[in-house]
């Protein structure tokens, strides 16, 4: 699992890269992979450590990517993608933003 508690420095670049995976390949999308979408959901649920207050949450990065690519609706209509959207709705930083256009 994603454990970044013992890393030093900002994790923003790593988190943004993981967030961009949601739109990396249209034919082999992470949303349709049986295990990858579950891992993504669990990583979204993780809260940044208090010492990482300047780091963005993975949920924010994923939501920004889905909105910028225009694929939020597509993910919501897909069975596995719907669970990822649910994780975004349940997250404290993105819950209200998912519903906004």
Image (spheres, grey):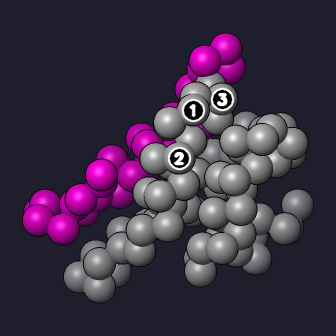
Q: Is residue 19 magenta?
A: yes
Quarter of the picture containing the C terminus is bottom right
Which percent across, then down, holds residue 64? 64, 53
Callout 1: 10 Å neighbours few (<14), some, many (20+)? few
Q: Is residue 67 visible?
A: no
In the rendered structure, the answer to whether residue 16 lies left or right of residue 98 reads: left
Foreground disc of the pair 1, 3: 1
Nearer to me, 35 or 8: 35
Whether 80 is drawn above or below 91: the answer is: above
Is the residue under label 3 in contact with that under label 1 (CB below 8 Å)? no
Q: Residue at x 35, y 57 (%)?
A: 12
Locate residue 25, reporting x and y percent: 60, 20
Which residue is depicted at the point 50% across and 36% down?
35
State whether residue 20 is above or below residue 14: above
State the residue lying farthest toward the bottom.
50
Are the residues flagged by discs 1 and 2 in contact, CB closer than 8 Å? yes
Q: Is residue 95 positioned above or below 81 on the image?
A: below
Per the image, the residue denoted by label 2 is: 38
Q: Which residue is mark 3?
A: 32
- Identify residue for label 1: 34
């Amino acid at each position: 699992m994603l454990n970044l508690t013992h890393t030093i420095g900002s994790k923003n670049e790593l988190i943004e890269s993981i967030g961009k995976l949601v739109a990396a390949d249209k034919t082999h999308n992470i949303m349709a992979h049986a295990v990858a979408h579950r891992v993504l959901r669990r990583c979204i649920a993780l809260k940044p450590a208090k010492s990482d207050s300047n780091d963005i949450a993975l949920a924010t990065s994923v939501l920004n990517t889905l909105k910028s690519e225009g694929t939020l609706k597509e993910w919501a209509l897909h069975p596995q993608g719907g669970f990822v959207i649910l994780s975004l709705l349940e997250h404290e930083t993105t819950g209200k933003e998912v519903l906004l256009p």
